[in-house]
Amino acid sequence: MPENLNFDMKDMNWTKWASIAEIVSSVAILVTILYLAIQTEQNTDAINSQSRQSLAESAVFEQSMWLQNPELSSFIVDNSIEMSFEQKVQLDSLLIMAFTRREFAYRQYKAGILDEEVWNQEAEVIALLLGTERTRSWWRTIGKNGFESDFANTTDSIILGKPYHPYWESLVKW
């Protein structure tokens, strides 16, 4: 057998093995990409779940704070009641806590973590919280200064030109 022919057979074997290796590496890359896509989706689901859990926990805490300070609701409803400095600090702190929670929800919504339905529910609570003369005055004079401008502007748009929230009047008449 000529020496040249033997050399060509070795080259063909190497070419064949190189082609097989290329196919195997392509399949391995495809499997890796698929695995990473699944992991990313699971991670996104976990982040969404964690965000919703955090909002639920803070809602429970917020509700407990309102229950521990029921007199603050009277101040919200009746603007004619004079508040002491200590009561103003309490109401301010409670409203800041409530709006910090809504700002967190807003950030999560803007990042695509919370869906529009959840954000709309939070926006309705914003309208409720700013649904009286006293709380709107608080928001305009000191409240909004404690929040980033995009959230403050969004909050302003929620209440702009809207009447006070009927919840408070209904609560008083109930």
Image (tube, helix red, strand yellow):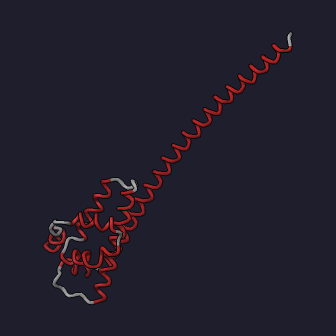
Residue at 29%, 86% in the rendered image: 87
Residue 129: image location, x then y, percent: 25, 70
**In this orientation, which residue lies closer to the viewer: 91 or 64?**
91
The N terminus lies in quadrant: top right
Residue at the extreme top of the image, as rendered: 1
Residue at the extreme front of the image, as rendered: 4
Query: What count of labels does the image hold?
Result: 0
Classify residue 65 as left or right of residue 174: right
Classify residue 9 as left or right of residue 135: right
Classify residue 94 as left or right of residue 32: left
In this picture, is 51 found above or below 148? above
The C terminus lies in quadrant: bottom left
Residue at 51%, 47% in the rendered image: 40
Residue at 16%, 66% in the rendered image: 161
In this picture, is 152 found above or below 113? below
Residue at 29%, 80% in the rendered image: 91
Classify residue 153 as left or right of residue 60: left
Residue at the extreme left of the image, as rendered: 173
Identify the image quadrant of residue 80: bottom left
**In this orientation, which residue lies closer to the viewer: 15 or 169?**
15
Residue 151: image location, x then y, percent: 32, 65
Identify the image quadrant of residue 149: bottom left
Identify the image quadrant of residue 168: bottom left
**In this orientation, which residue lies closer to the viewer: 106 or 88?**
106
In this picture, is 92 found above or below 31? below
